Amino acid sequence: MIRSGMLTAAGPAKRPREVVDLRSDTVTEPTPEMYERMCLAPTGDDGLDGDPTARQLEVAAAEKVGKEAGLFVPSCTMANLIAACLHARRAKQVVLEATSHMYTAEREGAIFANAFYVPVPGSAGAMDLDLLSEAIEGNNARLRTGMVGLETSHNSAGGTVLPLHHMADVQRIAAARDIRVHLDGARLFNAATHLEVLPDAIARHCDTVSLCLSKGLSAPVGAVLAGDRDFIENARVLRRALGGQQRQVGVVAAAGLVALESMASRLAEDHVRASRLSAGLRSIGSALRASSPQTNIVMVDVSETPHSAELWVRALFEKGILVRRWSNSQLRCVTHRHIGDEDVQRAVGAFAEVSAVEQLEEKQSA
Ligand SMILES: *Cc1c(COP(=O)(O)O)cnc(C)c1O
């Protein structure tokens, strides 16, 4: 769908608007300001004496989350993997909320971390604290735990934000047993926006944190891992071992700097539109059950409709609306910088049309 238009300092040709792409906030394109900074970024060899722009990004990101140091990495997946590898070094368990991204989408990382990834059930993305304690020191916890992972906002739980008191509780449980807490903050800025706090007010409840620059913040690629100086020094070595060390990486880090400096302030807009989308879907009828979003993700339960999630995805696609099948009965819709008010209306309209067709079909077959 994206034209490979000429890249100039002003950015690529505007992407065509015929589709409403609610699949993910990862589809956001770099901004014109990002392209400008990329062209002007001072660069160096990040494997030799360092890339000044990458260094600037690392310092800026660490400061935002209130940590001593940062490390620019190609993806948030690599940031989380490095954290698991380092925290689980002399232990064998990495304990995670059962529906977290690190468990559902990244747990093959266990191969590299040489540790078991242990899922702990929870609700709205928050682990049950009794079950967490059980996983760490219950009868079946024969291995030592090196890391407890948190995720906020929580992707699979529909973009829900962990309450700070929950994070403080997890921190207390972990610290009492000399266990590190890592925060998968791929969408930390969405969480901060929802809570109306600065990111460091959230990140203070963890030892290390990862940030994704290429989701709602619109950078083309990249993530940052942050923690204390020692940890980041070790992380830098591991990043190299994993093939994540890059050379004139300032070209992309420059876009990350713009993401960090000026893109978080617009996330509230995405949250408002997600709420409108949810309200619009609820107004269609009772069969479609849309979650009430705290951030930019709306989960739509279609199990009360005659069609599977798969069929919904196809029917909506034919109307120019792109959504993600999340399970047999669930769709995920994500708002982002390229979703305006009209796009929300179009999406609601398309859902209504597909619903109407379904009701008709049901009547005919009844
Ligand atoms: C997208 C995502 C990741 C992985 O980020 P990449 O940059 O795509 O590797 C990790 N955790 C969560 C919660 C995510 O949503």
Image (cartoon, rainbow, N blue to C red):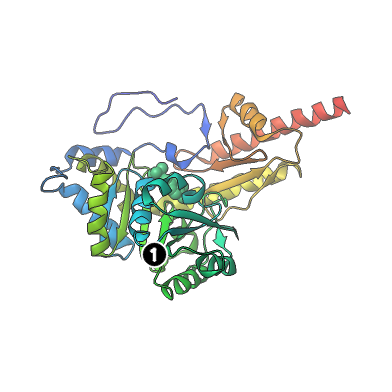
Q: Work out whether residue 78 or residue 251 is closer to the camera in this orientation and state it.
A: 78
Dot 1 amino acid type: Ala
Residue 346, compared with residue 231, is above or below; it is: above
Residue at figure coordinates x 39%, y 53% from the top left: 264
Q: Would residue 210 be seen by someone viewing this image from the given angle?
A: no
Q: Would residue 184 be seen by someone viewing this image from the given angle?
A: yes
Q: In which quarter of the image is the C terminus?
A: top right
Image position of 347 (left or right of 12): right
Q: In which quarter of the image is residue 306?
A: top right
Image position of 353 (left or right of 234): right
Where residue 266 sits: x, y (%)? 42, 51
Residue 252, compared with residue 363, is above or below; it is: below
Q: Quadrant of the N terminus?
A: top left
Q: Quadrant of residue 90?
A: bottom left
Where residue 16 sits: x, y (%)? 44, 26
Q: Work out whether residue 225 or residue 176 is closer to the camera in this orientation and state it.
A: 176
